[in-house]
Image (tube, rainbow, N blue to C red):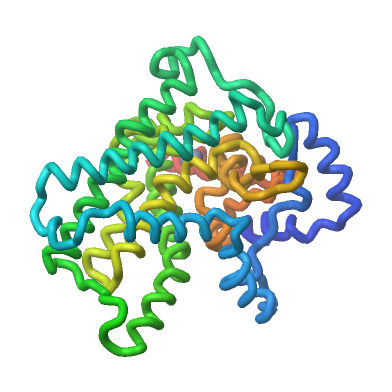
Amino acid sequence: MSEATSISANTGADASTNASLRAKQRKQWNYLPPEPLAVPPLWYRPWRKPLAVAWFIARPWRPTKERFWFLMIALVLWFFFTPPLETMADFHWQWMSYIWARNFIITLAIVGGAHLWFYVLRGQNAELQYDARPFVKGSKRFLFGDQVRDNMFWTLTGGVGAWSAYECLLLWGFASGFSPLLGVGEGSPWAWVWLVALFLLIPFWTGVHFYAQHRLLHWKPLYKRIHSWHHNNVNIGPWSGLAMHPAEHVILFTDCLLYLFVLSHPVHAFFNLLIHGLGAPLSHTGFEGFRLRGRKRLDVADFYHHLHHRYFDCNYGSPDTPWDYWMGTFHDGTEAGDKAMVEMRRKKAERQRNKKNRKVKA
Ligand SMILES: [Zn+2]
Ligand SMILES: [Zn+2]
């Protein structure tokens, strides 16, 4: 049985086994999602069409999902908080600093607001919090010896800086005629079909890109110099999402360069940028959802990536894309998943030992 098959098979563990495993796991977790992380229906075999279609189109776009709100924010930004396109055909500091300032304010309001609600006001105490340990203080691993301040610094400097720089480049592309601009209300009905289809495709594009660049960053030389900064955060909060080496900020947002060359609208570009600019911090909140008056109002963190911070060499991608299932690096959150990870590490170490021995003999 391949590594991929053995790890994926864990998703099929029966309910009673899961119940006892989950009880055991509660010693190291404060909260676990109700089921082991499952393979999304789109990648599930045998393929169940209605389920897969519903998951692809309807599920991630409900108002309880971040994706819906990123699209709403992208529309608001375009209609109310973006300078007229014709003024952005040249790189001028005035409109570029406006873009930077509005992204800075959005980050402060939404990421800062999430930190305030979850960790300062303790708005829902530890309810739905994966790991209840406090953030690190007094460690040389972090700037100012403080995890939260360090994370805020890197988010508000490199994070907002890279996001805004890419946004300015894309807006210049649309304004100057360098990029193909999809003018809504003009052209054929196919333009409308493409307009909508591109929104559905963007999360998959960002997922594929995220997996590829993340695997690359786990390559030893890049990991040591760049990605280890982000992994200093074992327990994570909203400010951890964009707390990374500035080179990683530059790499993270490269997926949005697509809109320089593909027929699109600035709202597509904003939506893609928000998936990283706000999506990364929200997926690191450490809380499964935002609860108000006893009800979960919005899904925020993603346990999938939380496991990556805890165990380091699993779940490199996003839950929407199949790469971890296919590459044998999927951790479903159960104790069986822990065992599969240990086994994968053992095999990896064995392969490395054999490689070394072969070199010595040669
Ligand atoms: Zn990583
Ligand atoms: Zn992370």
Q: Is residue 172 left or right of residue 273?
A: left
Quarter occupied by the C terminus: top left
The residue located at (74%, 55%) in the rendering is: 10
Q: Is residue 361 left or right of residue 54?
A: left
Q: Residue furthest top?
A: 138
Q: How many marks?
A: 0
Q: Is residue 251 visible?
A: yes
Q: Residue 49: x percent and y percent?
A: 66, 81
Q: Is residue 335 visible?
A: no
Q: Is residue 162 above or below residue 318?
A: above
Q: Is residue 190 above or below residue 257?
A: below
Q: Residue 79: x percent and y percent?
A: 33, 60
Q: Residue 226: x percent and y percent?
A: 35, 34
Q: Residue furthest right?
A: 16
The residue located at (64%, 64%) in the rendering is: 40
Instruction: Report the front residue among 101 and 157.
Output: 101
The residue located at (66%, 45%) in the rendering is: 289
Q: Residue 166: x percent and y percent?
A: 25, 50
Q: Is residue 156 left or right of residue 32?
A: left
Res 62 quadrant in image: bottom right
The residue located at (62%, 25%) in the rendering is: 121
